[in-house]
Image (tube, rainbow, N blue to C red):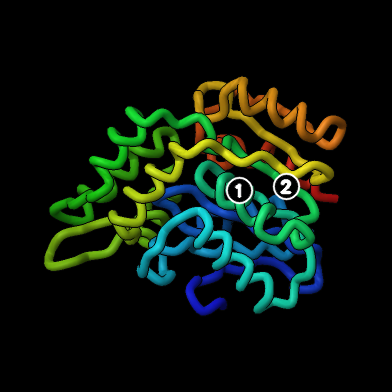
Amino acid sequence: MSDALHVHSYGPVDSPPLLMLHGVCGHGARFRRLAETLLRGYHVIAPDLRGHGLSDRLPPWTLEQHAADLLRVLDSRGLDKTTVVGHSYGGLVALHLAHLAPRRVGRLVLLDPAVNVKPEQALEYAQTAEVIRADRGEALATQRHDWPGEPEEHIEEEVAANWVEVDGTWRPRYSPAAVITAWSEMCRAPVLPLPGLPTLLVEATREAFVGPDFVKACKFALGDEFRHVGLDLGHMLYLEDPAATAELIDGFAR
């Protein structure tokens, strides 16, 4: 564990490492099933980002601070270099980590990174960051709405992991202030992968979180080191089709 972050770990510690970063409102344990069933050849390190899960709540919640937190995670585990996988907002954090410590990121996998968020969209989502439900039943109903099509077992697991009872009401475990800040951070111009960094971009084509400009810029910056794959899925692609997602990660990370 770093000074600030709670870290979930899966798989043998002597296996190749994968640092996996969740999106806004999430937590590292969302990668558990993927790690334990489809990425068993890796040691998956999945922190709760600052302001999320069981990690430190204190600001700042900027992309630069998230990157610094993750560098401490790598240092605390003695990892000189690793493949980094980032989903959504975690993709932006992964890009900033690669800029902060370029020698520590061997390969980069961006799972539908939130690089094309418009200010109007960010404002809409930021204004709904504080979620309060009357009881556990309403929390389950909210999670079902957010994850349509997910098995009830997964809904129950997510509520157990990422919701808490506070003063007789149920709320997601994340800090609303951190989430609001994250939506603001998503409006910044995205940094690009550094030249020479092998990068896989997996785009969920049913959504618009990536956009053609980012794809074009990555191709220009990276040339043959850039691979772009589109999947006919929604934003939570690693939940919707874990097998296809894991196959892409595994094929690129090896």
Give the x, y percent position of residue 135: 17, 55
Residue occupied by mark 2: 108
Return the residue nearer the eye: 61 or 149: 61
Residue 39 spot, x, y in % from top left? 72, 54
Does any portion of residue 246 appear in the rendered image? no
Q: For residue 44, which quarter of the picture?
A: bottom right
Image point 45% across, 31% down: which residue?
Answer: 117
Q: For this view, does 118 lie left or right of residue 237?
A: left
Q: Secondary structure at mark 2?
A: strand
> Residue 24, can we see it?
yes
Do the CB atoms of the residues marked 2 and 1 lie less than 8 Å apart? yes
Q: Residues within 10 Å of mark 2 (few under 14, many from 20)?
A: many
Q: Is residue 117 above or below residue 136?
A: above
In the image, 192 versus 229, the foreground residue is 192
Callout 1 secondary element: strand
Q: Is residue 59 above or below residue 218?
A: below
Kind of residue indicated by mark 1: Gly
Give the residue drawn at x 80%, y 46%. Answer: 197
- For the residues labelled 2 and 1, the Cα–Cα distance comes to 8 Å
Q: Nearer the viewer, residue 46 or 134?
A: 46
Q: Amino acid at mark 2?
A: Leu
Which of the two labelled residues, at mark 2 and mark 1, occupies the earlier sequence position? 1
- According to the picture, the residue beneath numbered tag 1 turns out to be 86
Please rate how many residues cluster around mark 1, counting C-alpha atoms within 10 Å: few if below 14, some from 14 to 19, many from 20: many
